[in-house]
Image: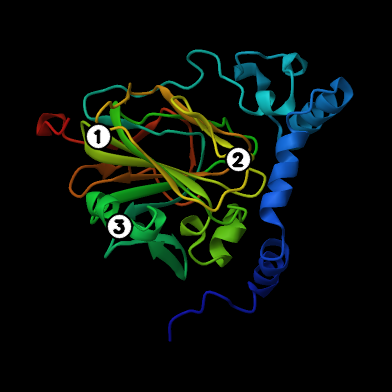
Amino acid sequence: MADSPITSSSLPDHLKTLLTQYPLPHHWLTQLMYILTRARWPAWKKWQIRWFIKRYQVDMGIALESDPLAYPDFNTFFTRALKPGARPIVHGPGEIACPVDGAVSQAGDIVDGRIFQAKGHDYSLETLLGGSPERAALFAGGRYATIYLSPKDYHRIHMPLTGRLQEMAYIPGRLFSVNPRTTRYVPGLFARNERLVTIFDTPAGPMALILVGALFVAGIETVWAGLINPHPSTTPQTWNYRDSPITLEHGAEMGRFNMGSTVIVLFGADCVDLASTLQPDAPVNMGQLMGTFDPAAGRF
C-alpha cells in the first residue's frame, strides 16, 4: 500500500498548517505588513532592521550599503542591492544562471502537464499559468525548478538567460505561506497563491519566471512595470509585449519580492538540462550554474 502523505508522525505539523494557514485573513495581514515595512519613523525602522539582522544572521558585508541604519525604511533594507561581484554569474556558452538566492524546493521534468510539489502533491501546469492552454503548450514535457527564498536571502530576481519579454500575467489567489512545511501540506499551493507569470523568448527556447506571492509578501515588482497590484485584487490581468518586446540581458535584474517567497522557472521540452546540484533542500546562490543548453540550436 502506498504511503499516505499524512502519517501519525506528521500529524502535528499537518494540524499546525491547517490551523495557522487556512483561517488567516491573508490579504489583510499582508496589507498591514505593507504599511509597517514602509513606515519611516526612525525608532521603529531601526528596531525592525536590528531585530531582523540578529534573528536571521544577515550578512551585511556583501550589501552595497553595509550600514543597516542608512536605509530609509525596512522594505528598502529588505530589498537591498549587493556589492558588485558578491554573486558571480555564470556566462559560459550554453550556461544558465540561477535567478535567486534560496533553497531548491523541487526540480525536474514536467510530466503529463503536472509539476511535482512535495510528497503526495503535484499541481497543474496550465492552472499555474493562469488556465491558459497556449502558455502551457510552451512548456509541456519541459523542465522546472522551484526555489524558495527564506527571509535572510537576497530578494532581487535576475535573468537566467538573455530574454525578450513576450507576456506578463497577474493571477490573483490566496497568500498561503510558502515555507517548506506549508509546501508539504497545502495541496496545489503554487497554483493557488497569487502569482506573476512572465514569459520570455531566450536562446534556450521559451522560459517562464513565475513569482509566487505569499503571506506578508507585500508586493511583487518588475523592472519594466514597477509594483504589480499592491492592493488585493480578484481580477486577472495580462500584458502583451510581443509587438514591442523588452529585452533583458543574462544576469540583469528583472524584479524583486517585498518580503520572501518562491520563484518557479520553466523551460520547454528538449531545451535544457538542469544541473545535478538542483536537489531538494540544496542551497543556491543567484548566478550559480542552474543548467545548460545547446547554444548551436539557434532558438533565439
Q: Residue 136 vs residue 225: left or right? A: left
Instruction: Name the residue beneath numbered marker 1.
Output: 201
Q: Nearer the viewer, residue 293 or 229?
A: 229
Position above or below: 174 against 19:
above
On residue 110, the disc is 3
Lower sequence index among marks 2 and 1: 1
Q: Residue at x 43, y 20 (%)?
A: 88
Q: Image quadrant of residue 54? A: top right
Quadrant where the C terminus is found in the figure: top left
Q: Residue 280: where, in percent of width, then height?
A: 46, 52
Q: Residue 15 vs residue 141: left or right? A: right
Q: Residue 244: where, in percent of width, then height?
A: 27, 26
**Residue type at tag 3:** Ile
Tell us which disc is closer to us: 2 or 1. 1
Give the spatial CA distance, label 1 vs label 3: 19 Å
Lower sequence index among marks 1 and 3: 3
